[in-house]
Amino acid sequence: MSTDNVTFTSAGSDEADSYAGSYDTTDGRIYTVSGGDWDTIAGAPEGEHDRIVVNMGPQHPSTHGVLRLILEIDGETVTEARAGIGYLHTGIEKNMEFRSWVQGVTFVTRMDYLTPMYNEAAYCLAVEKALGVTDQIPERANVIRVMMMELNRISSHLVALATGGMELGALTAMEFGFRERELVLDIFEMVSGLRMNSAYIRPGGVAQDLPVDGAQKIRETIPLLRKRLKDTADLLVDNSIWMGRTVDIGYLDLAGCMALGITGPVLRATGLPHDLRKSQPYCGYENYEFDVITKTTADVYGRFLIRIEEMEQSLRIVEQALDKLAPGPVMIEDKKIAWPAQLSIGSDGQGNSPEHIKEIMSESMEALIHHFKLVTEGFRVPAGQVYAAVESPKGELGCHIVSSGGTRPYRVHFRDPSFTNLQSVAAMCEGSMISDVIAAVASIDPVMGGVDR
Amino acid sequence: MTEAERAIVPQGIEELEIIGVRHGSFGTSAGGDTSGFGGLVEPIVMPAPARRPFGGWFDEISDELELSLQAAGLPATDAIEKVVIYRDEITYHVRREHLIAFATVLRDEPGLRFEMCLGVNGVHYPGETGRELHAVYHFLSITHNRRIRLEVSVPEGDAVIPSLYAVYPTCDWHERETWDFFGIVFDGHPALTRIMMPDDWPGHPQRKDYPLGGIPVEYKGGTIPPPDQRRSYN
């Protein structure tokens, strides 16, 4: 590219306009453009504007959160695509090294904020593995975990459909998706007290048992959810406008997925039935009947269909979990690990239950000691490292923890599926239209809280 | 670790991976602590290397690995420093100069077939002189439904590890993240730039000598120090 005889015809000289200036580099003259009339800005001679780099995001409604896409375009065609991330980095992994093992749950639940149950489950499974107590987790706790995780899968997939639909212009799908998600969040609120970031799954079990009529309420919600999910699906499945935007878009085949480490619906859309719930079951998933949904189209539409059908399978699992729900403890029996208190709502708000306070204050000295030690100091995890993974709605969510034998993690690292899957943006989008980038990114369903952690 | 501190390690335990020494139960080193807990001294010992037979499929995979490495002209004893088995997980400590050959064998050998690399992350052990920085790789074989872990240790002053980008392209962002947070240079990576922190950020935040940061918070007359300066129960 020649840098001679450049005329820049926007507002006067380059120096005068700090927002649309130009400067020379070894690759030629670079124009920085931010708004204005394209005809006047692009007034540089032919050959001068043959490389146009567009920043999409980080503040762009259709980039799924603070994701920055750096697109090099030729007309409407994307010739190179790069993703810039890190705008939501909050240092969760570092912070966890300064808190007790139990406190870590409240951090990890905020990573991928659409799948808090999975973050908690992956972390707790890893901690339990490091403690060597995986077999001692009560049956009821495992059933509740599975139930909450599958409900969370529905809410996460609904947001994927809702935001994906919105980004492609299907606003009704968004309204339906977020409305149906409320049904699931209401259940979360009833069970854990919080709609999101619930810190419900804890090392050793779950924070507290279901409310008295909890199982009944969940059972009552399922038919409504099933009907509404069908309505949402009917909006888009076989919808010619939706298919026009999604079929054969964002193609990524099996070899590409393997090389890039892609898991979840994107991988299953290539026809490989890889699902950790089947291949390496945890929390008793081997006792549930469900199908692993696969498609062979490897495109955005295939991933969309997988999410639709997986929600149906999740409802099946929730129903089975409700049937399995037998009375019993929801926290490990080992008093050196089990969080001692149960919360209840009194006249002065939420707090430790009166029975527990009575027990530690006037009945059992051991209970008081355990309560004090666990709350102030926390339990110790033997030195060593473990890795535990769960099949989150987005793919394999892995948790690698290293303990030095103390009451705090020595190092915690999450292999977040959104982070890894987002690497495929270039493979999916290069050579396609700009509008297809939106569809492709939506089909990956990245959540930046999980990507950046 | 000084010689005086080393003396508290029981006889014969030297071959273990001792990553540091823990003092006291309340993290006190001086001051008004009269509880006596401050005098407690205990070595931090990571799980010991395993010896054959490992049990289960660990032997099978290790045999396969040794044969495959041999066929690739790389004796297993050269490549593998040690093998640690802990909580039903196998960890191969690999010398960095053989990492790429090792990973290629893992990917290509039909009996191993680890199709998927689950990325790399770092761990900083400032107490382990000469091998302060560890890079930990996790692999998944969908064909055989197995998981293994590789660990590569490098000194802080020469923190260079060959990049696995060419073998497993998924390592692209994972290696950038590990560079960003730990300052491990992945030699051969096409664009090893910071990924989470701003480009001009000084330091590598996940290292143990990098402070957490934070300010004291005042509430109703009391002052709560930032998390990394609070009394800790180590």
Image (tube, rainbow, N blue to C red):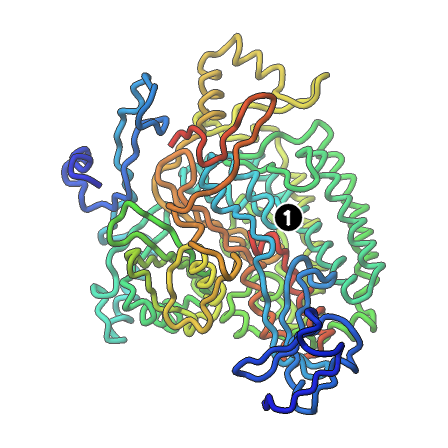
Residue A297 appears in the rendering:
no
For the point 33% across and 47% down, the residue is B86
Q: Secondary structure at mark 1?
A: loop
Q: Nearer the viewer, residue B171 or A135?
A: B171
Q: Quadrant of residue B61?
A: bottom left
For the point 32% across and 60% down, the residue is B159
With A135 as the anchor, is B22 left or right in this view? Answer: left
With A228 as the anchor, is B56 left or right in this view? Answer: left
Q: Amino acid at mark 1?
A: Tyr
Residue B114 appears in the rendering:
yes
* Residue A355 at x, y percent in the picture: 60, 15
* Residue B209 at x, y percent in the picture: 37, 46
Q: Quadrant of the C terminus of chain B?
A: top left
Q: Which residue is mark 1?
A: A113
Figure check: B80 above or below A37: above
The number of numbered discs placed on residues in the rendered structure image is: 1
Figure check: B177 above or below A6: above
For the point 62% across and 32% down, the residue is A326
* Residue A289 at x, y percent in the picture: 62, 51
User: How many residues crowd around disc 1 within 10 Å: few (fewer than 14), some, or many (20 or more)?
Assistant: some
For the point 31% across and 22% down, the residue is B37
Figure check: A438 above or below A48: above
Figure check: A349 above or below A325: above
With A264 as the anchor, is B79 left or right in this view? Answer: left
With B183 as the anchor, is A119 left or right in this view? Answer: right
Q: Quadrant of residue B154?
A: bottom left
Q: Return the chain for callout 1.
A: A
Q: Quadrant of the N terminus of chain B?
A: top left
* Residue B184 at x, y percent in the picture: 37, 60
